[in-house]
Amino acid sequence: MSKYPVRLAERSLREIAKDAVDVIGPAARANTFVRFRYSYTEISASGGNAHVKSRNTRLEDGKLTSEAFEGDLDRGAYEQIVGEAQHHFLGQTALLLQSLSWFLPSSWKQSSDD
């Protein structure tokens, strides 16, 4: 039967030449083939506080970087953020609908009456 725990005999270190290892420099930054960026932010409210979670991940110049944080906000700041997001969304929706309104039949009747 084998004996546990197994103990190894001591080994001596071997000498290596200082020039034995070639160091490779970083890749040129001008020829990056792949770039990737991912961003995620979540804001939720319960009671008098709002909870914020955010994550950013990016791959640029051969380097992967990831950042994440969590925190709490005042309810007033949450209301302001939601109001600005709704205003921005409604503005973008109005622009889209305005560009599509030329295809509606009611816009043809108005243009022919002018």
Image (tube, grey):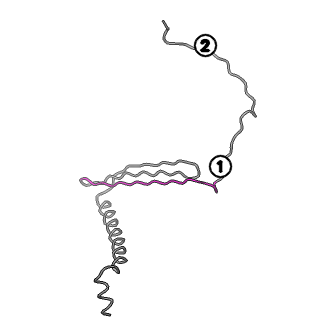
Asked if 14 appears above or below 65 in the picture, the reply is: above
For image coordinates 32% across by 91% down, the residue present is 112
Q: Residues within 10 Å of mark 2 (few under 14, many from 20)?
A: few
- The image shows residue 43 at horizontal and vertical percentages of 33, 55
Which mark sits nearer the N-terminus, 2 or 1?
A: 2
Residue 67: give x, y in percent of width and height: 46, 49
Q: Are marks 2 and 1 in contact (CB under 8 Å)?
A: no
Among the 4 quarters of the image, the one containing residue 30: bottom right
Q: Nearer the viewer, residue 97 or 39?
A: 97
Element type where label 2 sits in the image: loop
In this view, the residue in front, 26 or 51, is 26
What quarter of the picture does the C terminus occupy? bottom left
- In this figure, which residue is indicated by the disc labeled 1? 27
Of the residues shown, which amino acid type is indicated by label 2?
Answer: Ala
The circle on residue 45 is none
The three-letter code of the residue at mark 1 reads Ala
> Going 42% across and 51% down the picture, which residue do you hit?
55
Q: Which quadrant of the figure has residue 87?
A: bottom left
Query: Is 104 placed left or right of 21 in the picture?
Result: left
Of badges 2 and 1, the one in the foreground is 1
- The count of marks equals 2
| In the depicted structure, whether residue 108 falls above or below residue 10 | below
Q: Residue under label 2, please give it.
A: 9
Residue positioned 41% across, 49% down in the render: 69
Write the start and end of the magenta stretch as one range. 29-46
In the rendered structure, does residue 109 fall within the stretch colored magenta? no
